[in-house]
Image (spheres, helix red, strand yellow):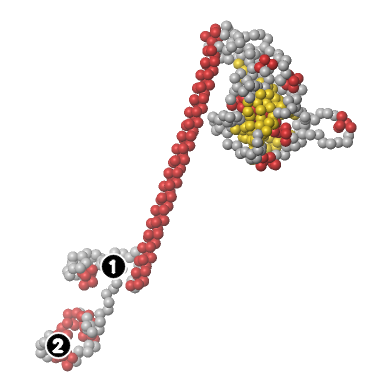
Amino acid sequence: MLDDSFPTYRMHSAAEDALQTTLFYTYNGSDPLRAYTLQRPAPASSANQYALALFDAHHQSVIYGEVLVKPEWQQPTLSAAEIRNQNGSPPNVPITPDSFSVLLYNPDQNIVVKRNAGGWNRADSWGFEMPERTFKLPSVSKLDQETGSNDVSDLSPKIMFHWKRDGRLNRDMTCYMSGKIAGGKKSKEPDITVAMYRSHKQGDAVCIYEPNMARVEVEDRKGLEVVLLLSAVVVRDLHFAPRQNPFNVSGAAPAPRRGSRPLAPSPNDPTLVSGALADTPSPGPTHTPPARPSPASNAAKQAEIDAETRRLQAMVAEEERQRRARLAREEEEKTRRMLQQEEDARRRQKQAEIDAETERLRRQYGVPAPRPTQSPPLPQRPFGTTTTAMSGALGGGGGGWYGPPVVNNLQPPPPPRPNSVGPGPSTQQQNGRNNLSPYSGPSGARVSALSFFGGGKTDEEKRKKMKKKQSVHF
């Protein structure tokens, strides 16, 4: 879709005259105005050649440029039955040449457009060169004024352009400025869009990409515009959508000479300047072959064209399928990596929260931090010799547990025993052993025995009892 804000030329063919096409100019959404007229000569006056000229829409005597293309001729490869149908002399087949010339007037220039064949991964392109300076410089010299030639030297700086096809199955093209030639040396630059050609059902259109025209250092802007219009139409007619009999072949062409190729037409060729659009017919073939080609040859050509079209469509479909499969695999791999990264981040965050909570509880209840080096395992104790703390850890009073005790760092340590209850067994043993107990005296021992046991043991028996415990302890 073209932008209406750019200078655009839309082609409209009149129904009453198929040889004439009017170009309507629109700019920034303005109403269409008649700017140029594309004129083709009558088939009778331009046999065995393709001719096209660009005239002014209001003054038909003003011509801006024209194109004349003469085809190459090749002997077709036919079967024996087809040769018999052709009476033993099959006609030569026209072959579209790889280059053509656009002739400009006032000043006269010959712009050669060459075709660069593409491959399986690149499209075809058609390149041409425009000189930077075209017009003669003002001079006070009479010799310069009398010399009417305006030839451009081969060493003068030139700007390189090329039309590039946007796709294999459409007729859209884009013209780029690709570099510069100075002193016979080419300097490649990044492609800059200059013009766009779009094919529509209601009529084709050529759009000039105005924002980049300030970077095009061509003095003859009108000549560049004419070359863009004529070259786009010629490429369309001869390569994209061949017209019915574009070379106006009315009979067999002369046999080609071996080892020879047609030369580019010269600007001074009278046939190119006046004969292409004149009423006088050009020199035709020396003998008159059958007027119509055989139906068998047409059917064979059509079958080859259909087979090639199907092959290209299948190739494009396969490339599109592979591209979609590759994109799907890349998207799936990217999603899997993202999910894995999110899972790892979630796991690290959860582990960090557990470590933080463990550290908080350890500091709260005074549990020492684990040592970084792993200690050797403790030896297993015999059955029934576990301490009170070990047996209490499993909720049992006896033995039956082998290995080190299970210590729960998250359980708070038991509170200290109040002093009102009295010292524990170990404290009593230690006090009895060191004779530091407040009940070590006779009265204290008697009061303790009476209060706890209710008996009337003597002090001597109490002392013997305590000494016996001390000997058992050791």
The quadrant of the picture occupied by the N terminus is: top right
Q: Is residue 139 above or below residue 49?
A: below
- Is any part of residue 242 visible from this angle? yes
Classed neighbour count for the residue bearing mark 2: other residues with Cα under 10 Å, few (<14), some (14–19), many (≥20): few
Labelled disc at residue 46? none
Q: Residue furthest bottom?
A: 443
| The quadrant where residue 43 appears | top right
Residue receiving disc 1: 408
Q: How many numbered marks have been drawn onto this rendered protein structure?
A: 2
Whether tag 2 and tag 1 are in contact, CB under 8 A, the answer is no
Residue 25 in the image: state x and y as whole percent: 67, 34
Residue receiving disc 2: 451
Q: Is residue 91 above or below residue 448?
A: above
| The quadrant where residue 386 appears | bottom left
Q: Amino acid at mark 1?
A: Asn
Q: Would you say 324 lies left or right of 411 here?
A: right
- Is any part of residue 157 visible from this angle? no
SS at circle 2: helix
Residue 327 in the image: state x and y as whole percent: 47, 40
Q: Would you say 462 lies left or right of 257 here?
A: left
Q: Amino acid at mark 2?
A: Ser
* Residue situated in front as seen by the camera: 135 or 7: 7
Residue located 68% across and 27% down the image = 37
